[in-house]
Image (tube, rainbow, N blue to C red):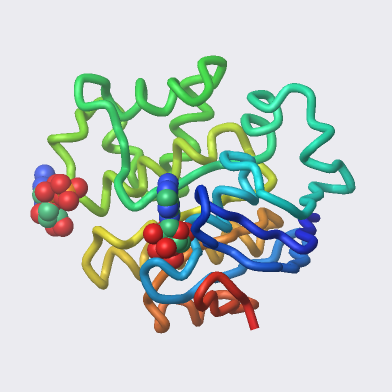
Amino acid sequence: MIKALNLTHYYNKDLALENINLEINKGEFICLIGESGSGKSTLLSLLSTLLKPTSGEIFFENTNYKDIKDIDNFRKTNVGFIFQFHYLINYLTVKENIKLANEKATNDEIYNLLKILKIENLLDKYPNEISGGQKQRVAIARALINKPKVIIADEPTGNLDSKNSLNVFEILKKLSESGTTIIVATHDKELAKFANKIYEVKDGKIN
Ligand code: ADP
Ligand code: ADP
């Protein structure tokens, strides 16, 4: 589904990733582990089209990223993002925050999605009225509302306690079992055990 060939990335003259080759299949749950600064975020940014590699190629279902015409539409239909910090808008309700990602989403669709995440009672709450773990589940809902083929998550539990972290990884696992491809960076080796495949990123390389 996603194939990376000889990816190398420099920030100015600083090498961040060197010669990465990866092949990710539909429905796989991939974890990138590695120390801070090892290159995980850079790799996720490249795979999600947020950053262009210095050299190398990336393919999504045989489309070369270089050939994608409408990058906004590509991201919207294919990739859902989850970050360490939830980036919810404080003056919008949970429902309105989710609508930002997909203005055509119906109330029923949003309700059903929140129900799966067990936060349907939070529909009309504001972010500062709910807990950190709940906020992260809202962020997951926002990433899922477009039914993306791939979820890319960068330290999605970096800001959560262990119980909420476990919960987020259980949700991601279920999503992968229903066919969504999951690519997650974490520095937590215990959580990484949820994945089908673990890649260790070290000094910009995967061994
Ligand atoms: P990780 O996600 O594993 O913490 P990153 O991909 O963020 O690693 O960083 C890899 C390397 O690239 C680090 O040396 C980091 O300092 C550098 N780096 C990351 N982002 C930038 C940037 N925007 N500009 C310059 N250097 C960066
Ligand atoms: P953050 O700002 O890091 O997203 P919060 O400050 O909202 O997180 O929450 C910190 C912790 O306090 C959470 O892990 C949660 O357990 C608890 N908490 C905060 N607000 C609530 C709330 N409204 N109901 C229940 N627990 C809450």
Q: Is residue 128 left or right of residue 78?
A: left
Q: Residue drawn at (13%, 36%), measured in percent from left and top?
A: 129
Q: How many marks?
A: 0
Residue 160's quadrant in the figure?
Answer: bottom left
The quarter of the rendered structure image containing the N terminus is bottom right
- Image coordinates of residue 85 in percent, x first then y, are 30, 47
The quarter of the rendered structure image containing the C terminus is bottom right
| Vertical comparison of 89 with 202: above or below | above
Quadrant of the rendered image holding ligand 1: bottom left
| Vertical comparison of 10 with 142: above or below | below
| Vertical comparison of 11 with 172: above or below | above
| Vertical comparison of 137 with 124: above or below | below
Toward the viewer: 170 or 3?
A: 3
Q: Is residue 96 visible?
A: yes
Q: Pick out the residue farthest to the right.
A: 62
Q: Is residue 171 visible?
A: no
Q: Residue drawn at (73%, 22%), measured in percent from left and top?
A: 70
Q: Is residue 7 left or right of residue 170?
A: right
Q: Pick out the residue farthest to the top.
A: 104
Q: Residue drawn at (64%, 33%), measured in percent from left and top?
A: 75
Toward the viewer: 101 or 17?
A: 17
- Image coordinates of residue 31 in percent, x first then y, are 55, 71
Q: Is residue 4 left or right of residue 201?
A: right
- Image coordinates of residue 71 in percent, x first then y, are 69, 27
Q: Residue drawn at (21%, 34%), measured in percent from left and top?
A: 127
Toward the viewer: 190 or 118?
A: 190
Residue 190's quadrant in the figure?
Answer: bottom left
